[in-house]
Image: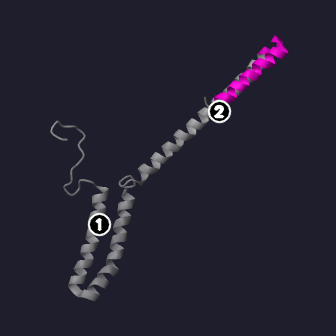
C-alpha cells in the first residue's frame, strides 16, 4: 500500500469517526470535505503526470533538434558556404606562400573535403549512398 493510500485511508476513517460523533445532520458536509480532499489528490496526480509528459516531449524535441539534418536549412548551408569561401582566401595565401603550388592544392583539397563532408551530412544519399525507400520490398532485409 502506498503512503498516499494510507493517508487517504486515515482521512476516510477520521471522516467516518466524525460522522458518528456529530450525527447525520453533518453527513453531507463531512462527505463534501472528504471528496474535496480526494479531488485535490487526483488533481495533484494528474498535474504530476502532465508535467512528466510535457518534460518527456520537450526532451524528445530537444533530442530531435540536435540530430544532424534537423537543423539543415538554406541559411545554414548558405552560411557554411560563405564561411568556407572567406577562409579559403587566407588558407590559399598561406599554402601558396609556404609550399607554392603543392601547398595551394593541399589547402584547396582540404576546403573541398570539408564542403563535401558537410554536403554528405546534410543530404544523405547525395554521393551514391543508399537512399531510404518509402516502399518495403521483399528483396531487402
Residue 1 is at least partly visible in this image? yes
Label 1 residue SS: helix
Cα–Cα gap, marks 2 and 1: 60 Å
Q: Decide which of 79, 102 is in the foreground and name it.
A: 102
Q: Decide which of 5, 60 is in the foreground and name it.
A: 5
Tell me the residue at 72%/22% (across/down).
Answer: 12
Q: How many marks?
A: 2
Tell me which secondary structure the magenta stretch mostly adopts.
helix
First in sequence, mark 2 or 1: give its number. 2
- Above or below, 106 against 43 in this view is below
User: Looking at the figure, which quarter contains the N terminus?
Assistant: top right
| Residue that lies at the very extreme toward the left in this rendered image | 139
| Mark 2: few/some/many CA within 10 Å (<14, 14-19, 20+) | few
| Coordinates of residue 30 in the picture (x, y in percent) | 77, 19
Span shown in magenta: 5-27
Residue 36 is at least partly visible in this image? no
Instruction: Report which quarter residue 27 is drawn in.
Output: top right
- Above or below, 7 against 112 in this view is above
Residue for badge 2? 3
Tell me the residue at 53%/44% (across/down).
Answer: 55
Tell me the residue at 30%/58% (across/down).
Answer: 121
Label 2 residue SS: helix
Residue for badge 1? 115
What colour-coding does the image apply? one colour
Judge from the rendering whether residue 24 lies leftward or rightward of residue 37; answer left or right: right
Amino acid at each position: 500500500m502506498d503512503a498516499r493510500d494510507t493517508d487517504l485511508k486515515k482521512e476516510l476513517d477520521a471522516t467516518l469517526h466524525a460522522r458518528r460523533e456529530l450525527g447525520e445532520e453533518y453527513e453531507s458536509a463531512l462527505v463534501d470535505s472528504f471528496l474535496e480532499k480526494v479531488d485535490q489528490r487526483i488533481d495533484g496526480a494528474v498535474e504530476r503526470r502532465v508535467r512528466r509528459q510535457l518534460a518527456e516531449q520537450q526532451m524528445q524535441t530537444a533530442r530531435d533538434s540536435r540530430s544532424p539534418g534537423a537543423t539543415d536549412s538554406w541559411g545554414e548551408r548558405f552560411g557554411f558556404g560563405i564561411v568556407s569561401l572567406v577562409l579559403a582566401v587566407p588558407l590559399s595565401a598561406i599554402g601558396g606562400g609556404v609550399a607554392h603550388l603543392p601547398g595551394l592544392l593541399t589547402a584547396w583539397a582540404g576546403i573541398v573535403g570539408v564542403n563535401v563532408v558537410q554536403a554528405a551530412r546534410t543530404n544523405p544519399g547525395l554521393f551514391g549512398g543508399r537512399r531510404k525507400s518509402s516502399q518495403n520490398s521483399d528483396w531487402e532485409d
